[in-house]
Image (spheres, rainbow, N blue to C red):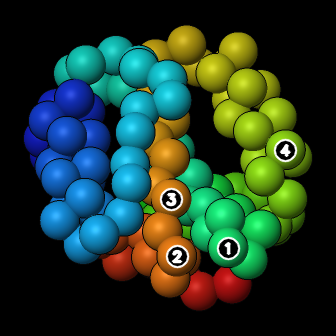
Amino acid sequence: MLLSSDIWVGALIRRAEKGGAFATVLRKGDPRAGAVLVKIVNRAEGTARLLAEATRGDGDRVWMEPAASRDEAELDRYAERAARIDPDIWVVEIDDREGRHFLVEPVEKT
């Protein structure tokens, strides 16, 4: 991320809200350099997924799913474990009927 984490998270939330979704910070991390997890929830379908920023083998930065589950409770437990390992991590939740993530960076398909 080239921007500080707090500014990047704020921009993501604004994009989501502008697109008609609801977005909120579930956990604030380090404002300057905290990693970010993005949880996308589709309450109408009862599904969720989690995205984390990663670096591919070729050096490109992408977003990928660190956990293959679609169960929201499992993804929340994953985020809790990640926060115990990295107390600087942010967790953002986007609730969208279409399941959109609103990330402008590349997202790896699973």
Disc 3 to disc 2, how far (Cα)?
A: 7 Å
Q: Which mark is residue 97?
A: 2
Could you tell me which residue is drawn at 18 percent across and 53 percent down?
14
Residue visible at 87% across and 46% down? 74
Pointer 1 with pointer 2, Cβ within 8 A:
yes
Mark 1 to mark 3 CA distance (whole Å): 10 Å
Task: Say if 81 sits above or below 93 in the image.
Answer: above
For discs 4 and 3, the disc positioned in front in the rendered view: 3
Q: Tell me residue 44's x, y (percent).
A: 67, 73
Q: Which mark is residue 95?
A: 3
Residue kind at label 1, given as amino acid type? Ala
Horizontal placement of 5 versus 66: left or right? left
Q: Earlier in the sequence, mark 1 or mark 2?
A: 1
User: How many C-alpha atoms fall within 10 Å of the one at disc 4: few (<14), some, or many (≥20)?
Assistant: few
Three-letter code, disc 3: Asp
**x then y, percent, for residue 91:** 50, 35
**In the picture, residue 64 is in which quadrant?**
bottom right
Q: Can residue 56 be seen at all in this image of the molecule?
A: no
Disc 2 residue crowd, few under 14, some 14–19, many 20+, Cα 10 Å: some
Nearer the observer: mark 1 or 3; the answer is: 1
Mark closer to the observer (1, 4)? 1
